[in-house]
Image: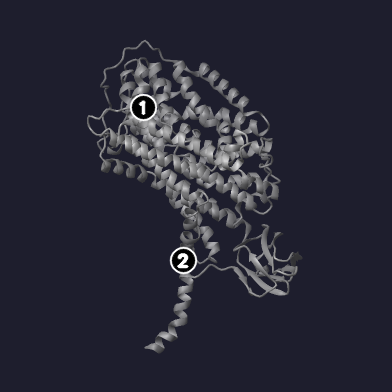
Amino acid sequence: MLRQLLSRLPLAVILAGSVLGAPPGGVAGQDAGASGEVSDSPRVFVGGIPFSVDLKAAEGAEAAYRIETADGRTLAEGTVQPGSSEAIDGLVVERRGELPLTAVIGGTVHAVSGTFVPGWFSLLPPLVAILLALVFREVVISLFAGVWLGALALAGFNPLVATWRVVDEFAVPALGDTGGQTQIVVFSLLLGGMVGVISKNGGTRGVVRVVTRWATSRRRGKLAVWGAGLAIFFDDYANTLIVGNSMRPITDRLRISREKLAYLVDSTAAPVAAIVPISTWVGYQISLIQDGMRIAAEQPGTSPEVAASLLAASPFTVFIHTIPYLFYPLLALFLVFLTSWTRRDFGPMAAAELRAASGGGLLRPGAVPAADTSGEILDPPEGVAERWWNAALPVLTVVSVVLLGLYATGREAAGPGASIMDVFGEADPFVTLLWGSLAGCIVAIALSIGQRILSLNDAIQAWIGGMRAMLVAVVILVLAWSLGSVTELVGTAAYLTQILSDRLPLQLIPALVFVTAAAIAFSTGTSWGTMAILLPLVIPLTVSLGGAIDFDGGAHYSILLGGISSVLAGAIFGDHCSPISDTTVLSSMATGCDHVDHVRTQLPYAVAVAAVTVPLGDIGTAYGLPNWIALTACALLLFGFVRWRGRIVEEEVHPAPATAPRAPRHSG
């Protein structure tokens, strides 16, 4: 029996190695007493893409080095100073037969090995993620597949080992990175928990009620919806569900069509959450910006000065700088206000508004309203007074604590003589976001318990329910970080730079990124997934093409800001046009609108905004047009278009009864 076990031991070891073994690659021949060593080398070699090898000399004497391919071609040679490390950059292998490399340093020979992949393979992880998202419309599976492809290269093309590497080499390090990523996950969960509590205690509905007190006409009713959407800025889902459900009785009484209400809700929710620096979006965006800047700084070919600037720059400051370049979200909010104030609508929306105002029905004849969304998690207990301050105080607490924290940490880092911009530039956004979100949770729970609106158990359950709603976002976030690490591992940005540097004008990047992001978001229905796929690619690519020069406001920095903001803006535009977008579906549900009618009437408005923002905003600012001039010109063009094509729906209509007639629900 023992003999049989021993005879099978080698096979068992081989099988265990194939299932659990470490990925191929690394350095052989290391000796603790050697005069030099290879301290770092690639684990994946991409054909034709430059890479670096870190050499370290022993104490006492300088060490001569030489790096050769397997066929004897010398890649680099020189000396390393005693006790110091040196990164040998610009090394290139063209084919698999040139591996393993031989590094001779101080008389010691080291074999440097790893997996070889052709250059085109570096495009596969993000490309597969995008294509799968287009086909299956499921971003989690798509991102996982992209990460798995990168892990496949890392594992020497062993599919089973690659599956394990997705978890232990990518997901766990991404989730456990206390340099900012772990803090972002906790911040998102805490803020989601706060949203759950202030929804349950009636505070968010109280805010909406305050806004709607002066809504006595169709114009004021529409502006009240817009104002309520701006007030619930901290989360797009909460915005959509609360504003839609709360405002529907008011707009029904004023004979505002359900299509118009759905547009007002949908075109306010995501844009305002994306622009305001205190929302459930901000941590996600900051983390992706930070990850993209790190990848750009560490990729071969980035100059030391630019790399130092990228690593030293605060991702929060970069996010703040992108806000004036978020042309589509800013002007989408403007168009909502413009059409509400002027009472002018165009396209299918004009027909819907005329129908509702003239008494022809809030819904199109034969329309099938989407299901109602008034779930228990958003409903306060029966008989509870919906006080606006139960939402305002926690939100103000978050804002105040974050601002004070940014100032305190920035002042400590920048010193007493620094300007206010330098102070906020040196601040630690991740720590302060944690402080603010936790403080907001404490205040929300204390208000709920202190007024006996919720018991401690009910408050905790609402808090947990709010965090549970963020779980999918956290999964997407971790996979996004993992895909970013994969693209760095296989040199995606470097390969794209190599094939595009002589073909792609730098000034066209923001416009092309906007179109790409819109296509992905339209097909997948998720703006967060779109950002996850594109930001880790766009930032390194823009930097490689020269878009990160002069962080003090130079033209090239404007292109980097334009590229970053175009990912977000294009994702929101695609969401607004997509019938499978979660916020589009929720808007139809919350407002009781036929979903197809909502998409059909909102599409011309979204396209109108994009049609002016891409040429004037994205392309114009890339060629040096000041962003304030671009915003003003876009706003004037939209105003002119609404005056030209818009149709006024008269105010002189009698309000409908409080309980408006509804189209029959679909029984199937």
Residue furthest toward the top?
Answer: 652
Secondary element type, mark 1:
helix
What's the image's color scheme? Answer: one colour
- x and y, in percent, of residue 426 in the image: 59, 41
Residue 178, placed above or below residue 443: below
Q: Residue at x 32, y 21 (%)?
A: 250
What mark, if any, has residue 86 been given in the picture?
Answer: none
Secondary element type, mark 2:
helix
Residue 646, placed above or below residue 375: above
Q: Is residue 213 left or right of residue 111?
A: left
Q: Nearer the viewer, residue 525 or 625?
A: 625
Residue 552, placed above or below residue 98: above
- x and y, in percent, of residue 30 in the image: 63, 73
Residue on which the image places disc 2 = 160
- x and y, in percent, of residue 340 in the image: 44, 19
Q: Is residue 121 left or right of residue 239?
A: right
- x and y, in percent, of residue 559 in the image: 64, 37
Circle 2 packing at 10 Å, graded few (<14), some (14-19), many (20+), is few
Residue on which the image places disc 1 = 207
Q: Is residue 531 left or right of residue 209?
A: right
Q: Residue type at mark 2?
A: Leu
Q: Residue at x 57, y 27 (%)?
A: 612
Q: Residue at x 63, y 64 (%)?
A: 41
Residue 154 visible within the image: yes
Labels 2 and 1 touching (C-beta < 8 A): no
Res 74 quadrant in image: bottom right
Frontmost of labels 2 and 1 is 1
Q: Nearer the viewer, residue 531 or 576?
A: 531
Q: Residue at x 49, y 33 (%)?
A: 276
